[in-house]
């Protein structure tokens, strides 16, 4: 095991002295978006990346994804360079803005992204059903994405980021546009994903959401880390003590205050009655309305976390591919042996044809036999195949003529 692979056992992301400088056409530095940032993201934790607009959060995320090249410093993801293609299938990403094909419905959208990851058809369908139920869009699966509100599109974006069962999930403003129901569900989902062994990088302006779920966090300003640590370390108030008691009348409070003055020499700063959070009250009202079976055309409250998340199917993919390659090699060798043998078609060649037939497909029927017409699929595969073709063509065009970019 080399140094980078050894580091990947301890950290998912490791940044040391990370710098990103944007330059103009003449390679003159215009802005230093990230300035000497050092942090690490450990396995099975939720890590918060906080800061005001322009503090370098999105630039840091893009460097982790390999979309931007660093100017200085060291950055590794799973012990490898972020540009290494082998780490891409292990990452799920939700960008700050949800970009979806407006003319596809949610089921077709997840089918498309599943094909990009090379998932088998049965796996794509199973995961699509589970994810749509999880984000509360199973009732809107027939509507095109162009008709969705921002919150509904955000729910679909979260499902898209999970379609490949990633080990490392990067979420940029995941609760933007979501109602309190969706916000609570996203926070519960993140906690459940951590229990299932996932690692999450969360960037958000909603500090209450980060406080509820993050194990550790860094706060950026001007491209530099101004504070870092666990939520407990950063938020602990060392100047006050809180006592939780049953509700007391004014006489009892006066006696307690007098006792504290006499024994400790300090006075009670403030006496107040606790109140519930607005989020909790909102959810209580919504749950009561649902109990009355009130009608709504919006997104429903999501179901449980998709069962496939954390199954480890992503790790099994490599072994499956190796088995298929080995079977293909053995089949090719058998065909070569059969071709060199002077014989007509017989049981041997029939067996070879059976080996070459893809798994799960029926053997061809003799001429003149009845052929059953397949049932129509709910997903328009022709549209998805066209999109995949466009993506492949664009990748070929970029690889043949995209060498003229400047980078620092």
Image (tube, rainbow, N blue to C red):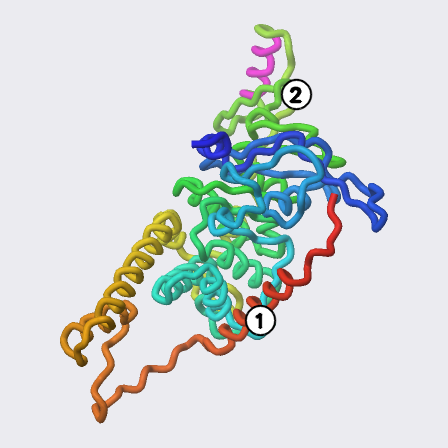
Would you call the spot at circle 1 few (<14 residues within 10 Å), some (14-19), or many (20 or more)?
A: few
Residue at image point 63% right, 7% down: 265
Q: CA distance from mark 2 to mark 1?
A: 67 Å
**Residue that mark 2 sits on:** 269
For this rendering, which residue is in front, 377 or 209?
377
**Residue that mark 1 sits on:** 390
Would you call the spot at circle 2 few (<14 residues within 10 Å), some (14-19), or many (20 or more)?
A: few
Is residue 302 rendered magenta in the image?
A: no
Residue at image point 59% right, 24% down: 236
- Mark seen at residue 404: none
Q: Position of residue 148 (x, y in %)?
A: 58, 68
Q: Position of residue 216 (x, y in %)?
A: 55, 32
344 on left or right of 50: left
Any part of residue 306 in sight: yes
Residue at image point 23% right, 71% down: 340
Q: Position of residue 6 (x, y in %)?
A: 46, 30
Q: Quadrant of the C terminus?
A: top right
- Region rendered in magenta: 252-261
Q: Among all residues in the image, which is located at the extreme left?
A: 347
């Amino acid at each position: 095991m080399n140094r980078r692979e050894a580091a990947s056992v301890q950290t998912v992301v490791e940044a040391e002295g990370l710098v990103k400088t944007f330059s103009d056409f003449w390679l003159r530095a215009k802005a230093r978006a990230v300035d000497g940032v050092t942090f690490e993201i450990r396995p099975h934790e939720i890590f918060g990346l906080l800061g005001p607009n322009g503090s370098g959060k999105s630039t840091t995320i893009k460097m982790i994804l390999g979309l931007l090249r660093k100017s200085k410093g060291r950055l590794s993801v799973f012990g490898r360079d972020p540009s290494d293609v082998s780490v891409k299938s292990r990452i799920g990403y939700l960008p700050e803005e949800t970009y979806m094909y407006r003319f596809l419905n949610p089921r077709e959208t997840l089918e498309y992204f599943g094909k990009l990851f090379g998932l088998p058809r049965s796996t794509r369908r199973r995961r699509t059903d589970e994810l749509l139920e999880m984000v509360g869009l199973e009732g809107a699966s027939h509507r095109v994405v162009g008709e969705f509100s921002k919150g509904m599109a955000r729910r679909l974006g979260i499902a898209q980021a999970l379609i490949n069962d990633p080990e490392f999930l990067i979420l940029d403003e995941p609760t933007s546009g979501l109602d309190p129901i969706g916000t609570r569900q996203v926070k519960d989902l993140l906690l459940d994903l951590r229990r299932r062994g996932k690692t999450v990088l969360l960037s958000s302006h909603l500090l209450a959401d980060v406080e509820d779920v993050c194990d550790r966090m860094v706060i950026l300003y001007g491209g530099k880390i101004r504070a870092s640590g666990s939520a407990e370390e950063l938020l602990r108030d060392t100047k006050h003590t809180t006592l939780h008691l049953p509700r007391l009348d004014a006489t009892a409070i006066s006696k307690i205050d007098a006792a504290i003055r006499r024994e400790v020499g300090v006075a009670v700063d403030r006496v107040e009655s606790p109140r519930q959070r607005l989020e909790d009250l909102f959810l209580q009202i919504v749950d009561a309305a649902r109990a009355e079976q009130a009608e709504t055309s919006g997104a429903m409250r999501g179901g449980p976390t998709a069962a496939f998340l954390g199954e480890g199917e992503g790790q099994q993919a490599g072994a499956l591919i190796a088995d298929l390659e080995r079977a293909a090699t053995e089949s090719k060798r058998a065909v070569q042996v059969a071709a060199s043998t002077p014989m007509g078609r017989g049981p041997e060649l029939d067996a070879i044809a059976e080996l070459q037939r893809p798994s799960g497909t029926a053997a061809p029927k003799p001429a003149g036999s009845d052929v059953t017409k397949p049932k129509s699929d709910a997903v328009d595969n022709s549209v998805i195949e066209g999109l995949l073709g466009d993506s492949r063509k664009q990748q070929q065009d970029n690889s043949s003529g995209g060498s003229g970019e400047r980078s620092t």
